[in-house]
Amino acid sequence: MAHMKTLTRAATLAVATLIAPAAFAASDTAEPVDQTVYEGRETLPDPTEGQCDVERSLVEFKDNLWRHTNGSFPATHSGLVLITDEGALVVDAGNTCVAKWLQDEIKTRFDADIKYVVMTHAHFDHLAGTQVWQDAGATVIAQRNAIEPIIGEKLPVATPDRVFDTEAEIELGGETILLHHEPAGSHSNSMVQVVFPRQQAMQCTDVCQSKTFPYMDFLDFYYDGWINTLDWVIEQDVDLIDVGHYNDPATTEDIVALRDYMVDLHDQVLARLREGMVWDQLWRTITAGNEHKEDWFGYDNMRWANIVGMYRWVNNHRRGVW
Ligand SMILES: [Zn+2]
């Protein structure tokens, strides 16, 4: 009898599959990662596991594209969420406890499961919680370079299921999502920009800024690739850019202003080093960023650190007559 039941269920399923509209079939152009190599890998304790008492939200961004946030200003972490008939695609997580909440929220509000997770880069603050969704069946995509630091730093996050080098595409529920990586690095060497062409929107975490000075002394920094990335972002000319932190999305105009500041800061530091200025003279004469003293966040607590970071980069990447 039990056998009969199984057969009947199988037959019903087969018929349902046949008569179902030839709907969508999620797919992507990334390559599989051999997960068996990393099975049982050592991870550090996850400090966000019990961090449930933080602000969180899921608000509409544009045309079925939503934005999830957690934390409180100014360290709010954010990422975009695309809802389709085939399930959701979520960019980053940022907190393990909040990831569980977000999974339930997406299920309750949209009756959708998380099908794809895109990691913007291998920094723990953006990836905490991705393992929750992977465990629930989501496919996790990252740039290939993300694997090394995730494993090497023992990050308690998902080990990517699939990776790509410079460009990849995801098809989900009739939507196309484009992933881009600048080979020269930018903020880490695993940075991914995520473009939603139909919505004219983009996820550009940490490299793009929304009326703020870049964070501290440019952690995990590659100047040339950062500028290349900003050039690429400007070229896309999308309407809305989520920067992974803070409250407001950025516009292309904001990215142009950020590029101008970074190049100005770089060129000023380089010129002064070539003049033979020592650090103590140099930092006092930098004027880059003064034009944003009023309209950008962080003039007092970020700009000085920006000078330190740029000085370090420039000094490490020049040689004169020996
Ligand atoms: Zn980062």
Image (cartoon, rainbow, N blue to C red):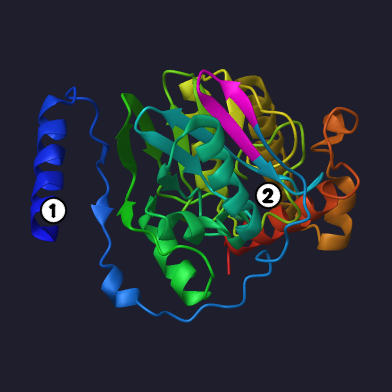
Residue under the point 88% across and 50% down:
301
- Estimate the x, y position of residue 153 in percent, counting from the top left: 53, 74
Mark 2 and mark 1 residues within 8 Å of each other at the beta carbon: no
168 within the magenta span:
no
- Estimate the x, y position of residue 110 in percent, counting from the top left: 50, 30
* Horizontal relation, residue 65 to residue 267: left or right: left
Tell me the kind of residue under disc 2.
Leu
Looking at the image, tell me whether mark 2 or mark 1 is earlier in sequence order: 1
Q: Which residues are magenta?
A: 59-68
- Quarter that holds the N terminus: bottom left
Residue 175: quarter of image? top left
Circle 1 crowding by C-alpha within 10 Å: few under 14, some 14–19, many from 20: few
Kindly state the secondary structure of the residue where label 2 is placed. Answer: helix
Residue named by callout 2: 270
Q: Is residue 50 visible?
A: yes
- Estimate the x, y position of residue 89 in percent, counting from the top left: 44, 38
Tell me the kind of residue under disc 1.
Thr
Residue under the point 48% across and 68% down:
149
